[in-house]
Each structure stands twice: as structure tokens, then as C-alpha cells.
Amino acid sequence: MDAEAIDRFFDRASEALPTYVSSFPAMLAGLAVATVVFLQGVSVVNDDRRENATSKDIAKRYRWVLLLGVLLGVCGMLSDFVQDRVYALHMLKLNKQHFANVHWLRHYVRACTA
């Protein structure tokens, strides 16, 4: 075999094999979306805190703490959701040939074993 044939073989093999996908861009996207939502939500929580600071009803006076906890929980779940979706899209984009090969190989194995 000559060097050109070997290079061609490894080029084709590298296209068929899965490629490593870093999770850092997905984490940044999730963090950015969660930060924007958190900053918008903090203004609502702060308004509620200021409006009810002098209320005699203790539930109204400390309602902002519950709102802040819910906001943090929602931001955490939103960050995870966006991170998962962005990572999945990057992985599909970089490894589309690998996933196509696996799909057709599965059909081929089913046909051979039937």
C-alpha cells in the first residue's frame, strides 16, 4: 500500500467515527440564558420586597424569599434544559455521519439475523 491510500483510508475512517464534542459552549449558552432570566426575575422580586416591606402580614412581608427561591430553581432547570439541547445539537452536527452509519448498520444486522 502506498502512503496516499493509507491517508485516504484514515480520512474516511475518521469521518465515520464519532468526534469529541466539548460541553463548554453548551454550558455557556445555558448560563447566559439563565442569567438573563434571573436578572429579569430579580427586578420583579425586588419590587415585591419593596412594596410589602412595611406590611403587617408576615406572609406578604417575606413572600419575596419564596419568589427568589422559585426563581433560582427555575433558572437552574432552564440552564440544564438549554445546556442539554445545545450539546445535543452540536453533537448531531459534528457526528451526523457516525449516527447515519449506526442507523443503517442496525437495519443491516436486523436483515441478516431475520
Image: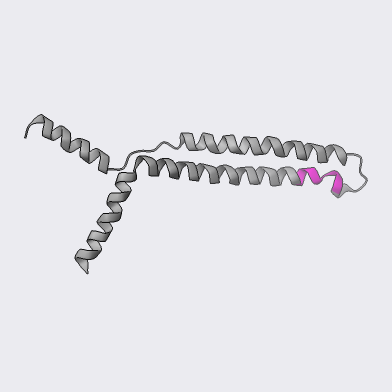
Q: Position of residue 17 (x, y in %)?
A: 27, 43
**Which residue sits at x=67%, y=38%?**
38
Residue ranking furthest to the bottom = 114
**Which residue sits at x=85%, y=37%?**
50
Residue ranking furthest to the right = 56
Q: Nearer the viewer, residue 23 or 107?
A: 107
**Which residue sits at x=44%, y=43%?**
89
Q: Nearer the viewer, residue 56 or 103?
A: 103
Q: Is residue 29 left or right of residue 51?
A: left
The part of the chain drawn in magenta is 60-66
Which quadrant holds residue 34? Answer: top right
- Is residue 35 located in the magenta-colored stretch of the structure? no
Q: Position of residue 78 (x, y in %)?
A: 59, 45
Q: Position of residue 103 (x, y in %)?
A: 30, 55
Q: Nearer the viewer, residue 53 or 108?
A: 108
**Which residue sits at x=12%, y=31%?**
4
Q: Position of residue 29 (x, y in %)?
A: 53, 36
Q: Is residue 76 left or right of residue 114?
A: right
Which quadrant holds residue 90? Answer: top left
Q: Is residue 34 left or right of residue 70?
A: left
Q: Is residue 25 left or right of residue 79?
A: left
Quadrant location of the N terminus?
top left
Quadrant location of the C terminus?
bottom left
| Main secondary structure found in the magenta portion | helix
Which quadrant holds residue 69? Answer: top right
